[in-house]
Image (spheres, grey):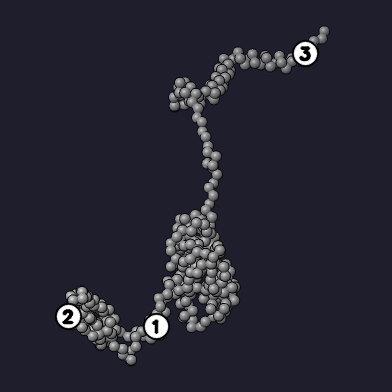
Amino acid sequence: MTHSLTAPSPGSSLRSAAMRFWRDPDNRSVLVGIAAVLLVHLFLFAFAPYLLRTDEVHASAKDKLAARQFNIEIAPDAFIPLPKPPPPNKYVEANPNAPDIVPDKTNNFSSKNQVLAQEKPQLDQHNDKPKLEGKKDIESNQTVSGQLTKPMESVPVVPSVATPSKTMTAPKQAQDPLAGFEKLKEGNDGIGSNMGKVPDVAKPMPDKVDGAKNAPIVEGANSMEPSVDPKKPRARPVLEQEHTRPAVFEENNFGTSNIGPVAYSAKWSSYGAYLHKMMEAIQIQWDRILLDSRTEPPAGTYVTVKFTMDSKGKITEIIDVESTSSEQGKQSCISAITMTAPYGDWTDDMIAVLGNSQELTFRFYYE
């Protein structure tokens, strides 16, 4: 007799092991605990965001918020950047004698308002520059020449002392008495009359006085004329010049029909007033440098200096220097610009138009 054993299938073996594990009370309690922990964590993961909220949300408030609608209309040009004002195109030096009139249209700016004009108008002429006699191969924006610094006295001023004066008595005025009234005379033949002729200097005077016809009206008037000392002559009179820079004019044969002081059309701007003071300071410093050097650069030459200036009025860089003059003439121009800096802070509208720095070009002429 033979006996054979058949191996159990994997499924039946697993079920048998599970049944034996579940019949043990300790193992069963461990399985129940693990299942409970898993269920609790799944519940907290799903409902914790709603259970831990601190604000109260009412259904009615939600309904109101859901029902309310907002309509927003945006203007077409709301987000279109406004165009910046055009930067100043050309600076011209104002004529201090020109009246303050705002021009209708111009690309020029200056330290004051003025309108294009000239002393002798040209009919049927409407140019943008006044007629001036000057040089052909230069660029100039000046219409009047003056002097900023007081000229040096060639002769020392003598202190004023009381000088004797001579008194001149005015001549007497010629006076004639009035001719009187009409005289009537009766006669056998009728009535006659006699009219007296009124003299040129007739006055109600009793007697005639001989004298000059054009004498002063005030009787006894004296004229005080200081006596002249040949050893101490009077100071030579000096004509007052305009408070403006010396000018080198650019020739222009065609002007305008407007009559008045020679001037360009220009509008006032803070940038124009700033440049006006800046150029005056550079001109005074340039004259001092040339006066101290006691030598003159070659006549008919020029120096062009290109530089940048920041919003604090400081010269940040000398970009380029073009010169037909000597080395002394070149360095004098550069020093005149750098030694007078800084020129002061820019205004807010200058910064809005020019930014934080600006490139400038100055040209100096030696005559």
Kind of residue at badge 2? Pro
Note whether residue 314 is visible.
no
Of the pair 47 and 25, the residue shown nearer to us: 47
Of the pair 28 and 273, the residue shown nearer to us: 273
Q: Quadrant of residue 302?
A: bottom right
Between label 2 and label 1, give the one nearer the viewer.
Answer: 2
Helix or strand or loop: what does disc 2 sit on? Answer: loop
- Residue 103: percent from left, percent from top: 48, 58
Helix or strand or loop: what does disc 3 sit on? Answer: loop
Q: Earlier in the sequence, mark 2 or mark 1?
A: 1
State the CA–CA distance, disc 2 to disc 3: 186 Å
Between label 2 and label 3, give the one nearer the viewer.
Answer: 2
Kind of residue at badge 3? Thr
Tell me whether the residue at label 2 lies in contact with that at label 1, contact meaning CB atoms closer than 8 angstroms. Answer: no
Helix or strand or loop: what does disc 1 sit on? Answer: loop
State the CA–CA distance, disc 3 to disc 1: 143 Å
Between label 3 and label 1, give the one nearer the viewer.
Answer: 1
Q: Earlier in the sequence, mark 3 or mark 1?
A: 3
Q: Which residue is mark 2?
A: 206
Q: Residue at x 53, y 67 (%)?
A: 122
The answer to whether residue 266 is above or below residue 39 is: below
- Residue 60: percent from left, percent from top: 45, 21
Q: Quadrant of residue 186?
A: bottom left
Q: Residue at x 67, y 14 (%)?
A: 16
Q: Which residue is mark 3?
A: 6
Q: Which residue is mark 1?
A: 153
Q: Earlier in the sequence, mark 2 or mark 3?
A: 3
State the CA–CA distance, disc 2 to disc 1: 60 Å
Kind of residue at badge 1? Glu
Q: Quadrant of residue 236?
A: bottom left
- Residue 179: percent from left, percent from top: 22, 78
